[in-house]
Image: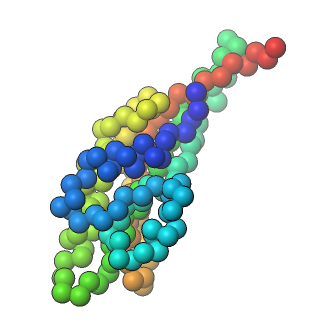
Amino acid sequence: MNQRISLQEIATRLREQIDPATGVNQILCALDANYLANVQDVTAWPLVIVGAQRSTPIANGRGFTGLVAQLVNVDFVVRVIVPRYVEGEAEEEDKLNRICDAVADAVMGWRPAGASAPVTWQQSIDGPPEQSAMTVDLLFQTQVSYQYSTRRG
């Protein structure tokens, strides 16, 4: 079993769960073929991007029985991008907060395929304040059980 979870599955979950009334125009996966073109199209903002993941073993799994089984924390990031200023609108921060809440509501407690624990929220990090867009990276975590046989034939 692989320690990675599907980023595309996370993006699909967000597309299914986030109400368009939150103001999200696009939900992307960083692995999409047209990702760069879509991110650079500021007319498509606000958008949500499922970005990347990091896997960290919790224990070394030993392997005394000929089977190595490791519990692995899998962290993944979802970035929210909202224009800092839209002519005629005065509530971009409120929109940013609504979208962040919708992302969290969509994935927290959900168990992606292959996960051995539900998704939990770890932290959020605001992007640089001098940019023309407001960004927030939402970091979530789940666990998988990574197993392989140490016996080679």
Residue 87 drawn above or below residue 31: below
Tell me the residue at 26%/47% (across/down): 17
Question: Left or right of 103: which side holds 67?
Answer: right
Residue 105 drawn above or below residue 130: above
Which quarter of the picture shows residue 151?
Answer: top right
Tell me the residue at 26%/83% (across/down): 86
Q: How far across and down, in percent of the image, does residue 150 sit?
A: 73, 19
Foreground: 95 or 26? 26
Task: Please identify the quadrant where the N terminus is shown.
Answer: top right
Tell me the residue at 32%/37% (across/down): 110
Residue 58 can be seen in this image: no
Foreground: 3 or 61? 3
Q: How far across and down, in percent of the image, does residue 11 sit?
A: 40, 50
Residue 72 drawn above or below residue 36: above
Residue 89 drawn above or below residue 35: below
Which quarter of the picture shows residue 78?
Answer: bottom left
Residue 79 can be seen in this image: yes
Question: Left or right of 78: which side holds 105?
Answer: left
Q: How far across and down, in percent of the image, does residue 127 sit?
A: 42, 72
